[in-house]
Image (cartoon, rainbow, N blue to C red):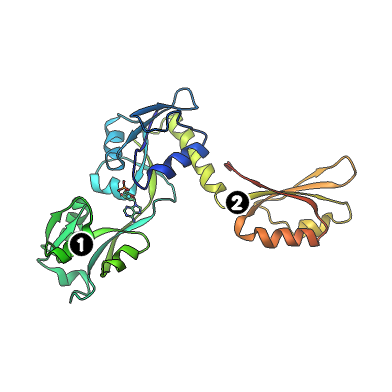
Amino acid sequence: MKIAIPNKGRLAEPALRMLERAGVRAEQQERRLFSATSIGNVQVLFARAADIPRYVESGSADAGITGLDLVAETGCRVPVLLKLAFGRCRVVLAVPQDSAARKPGDLKGARIATKLPNIAGDYIKRKKLHAKITVVDGATEITPYLGVADAIIDHVSTGATLEMNRLRAIDTLLESQACLVARRSTPEVRELRTALEGVLLAEGKKYVMCDVSKAALKRVLAVMPAMESPTVLNLANGGYAVHSVVAEAELLRVVSELKRAGATAILVLPIERMLP
Ligand code: AMP
């Protein structure tokens, strides 16, 4: 199986890390075209994020990690099997802060600069704006000040770049994040999806273990959160070990409550994957 992942750009590192956590470690990380992985029959293909939907659609790769926006932009017919919760951004229509335009309808016949001409073209048609698209390769946000465009359609994550360039978003075209795509759902593709799902489920969670005397067990179980039920194991000394999965956000509170309830030898461990 060949998995295409971005060779550079903002999706590259997180995609590689996520695959690693799912148990697929690329042996060559210096971004050759292909790399063998820790799994015998799996190869990684390093490619431009924007080309990955096409490689998957054509069968050059069996699966790929790319952005939802890029799937839309290429118009490739590749099913999105899983959203991966990184590379989140919005594609917005923005105008200079001092523009009179308040809503998309105010941009009839305007010039719009973008790196995403297909998404922009569909939007302009849908909104009947009869606007003219100027395709740029980067730094879209400066085009209004160069007199090249009246508005832009571009990616935004925090909004800081828009702010810095004195632009204001007036509509959101789509919400994007990284995703797993595959042309066909083979057993290997399903395995990969399940492994990545396990990584997503484990995100922000820790495994907590502690020792508890017989007398304190009831109190500890009352404060130990659990996905279903905490695990209780017998210890040789007549006490118990209690294990559970705890959300990182609750960890501080849970650990101090466990201590107060009489738990000892509290261990907090990372969870790589969860497969319920
Ligand atoms: P790259 O241009 O190779 O860094 O990757 C661009 C892809 O990263 C986009 O197509 C989006 O899917 C994703 N992305 C996430 N946040 C942003 C952002 N603030 N600006 C541009 N792309 C973003």
Q: CA distance from mark 1 to mark 2?
A: 41 Å
Q: Amino acid at mark 2?
A: Lys
Q: Nearer the viewer, residue 170 or 83?
A: 170
128, 264: nearer the viewer:
264
> Viewer-proximal residue, 37 or 230?
37
Q: How many residues crowd mark 1 within 10 Å: few (<14), some (14–19), many (20+)?
A: some
Describe the element under mark 2 as helix, strand or loop.
strand
Position of 268 with respect to 123 (left or right) is right
Name the kind of residue labelled 1 in the image. Ile
Residue displayed at 42% across by 43% down: 13
Q: To which quarter of the image does residue 145 belong?
A: bottom left
Q: What residue is shown at x 43% (from left), y 45% (from top)?
A: 14
Mark 2 closeness class: few <14, some 14–19, many ≥20 residues within 10 Å? many
Quarter containing the C terminus: top right
Residue 238 appears at what percent x and percent y? 90, 44
Q: Secondary structure at mark 1?
A: helix
Q: According to the image, label 1 marks what residue?
A: 142
| First in residue order: circle 1 vs circle 2 | 1
Q: Could you tell me if residue 68 is visible in this image?
A: yes
In the image, residue 127 above or below residue 115: below
Figure check: 113 above or below 170: above
Q: Tally the marks.
A: 2
Name the quadrant of the N terminus: top left
Is the residue 33 above or below the residue 208 in the image? above
Q: Which of labels 1 and 2 is toward the front?
A: 1
Q: Residue 251, image x and y in percent?
A: 66, 58
The residue beneath circle 2 is 205
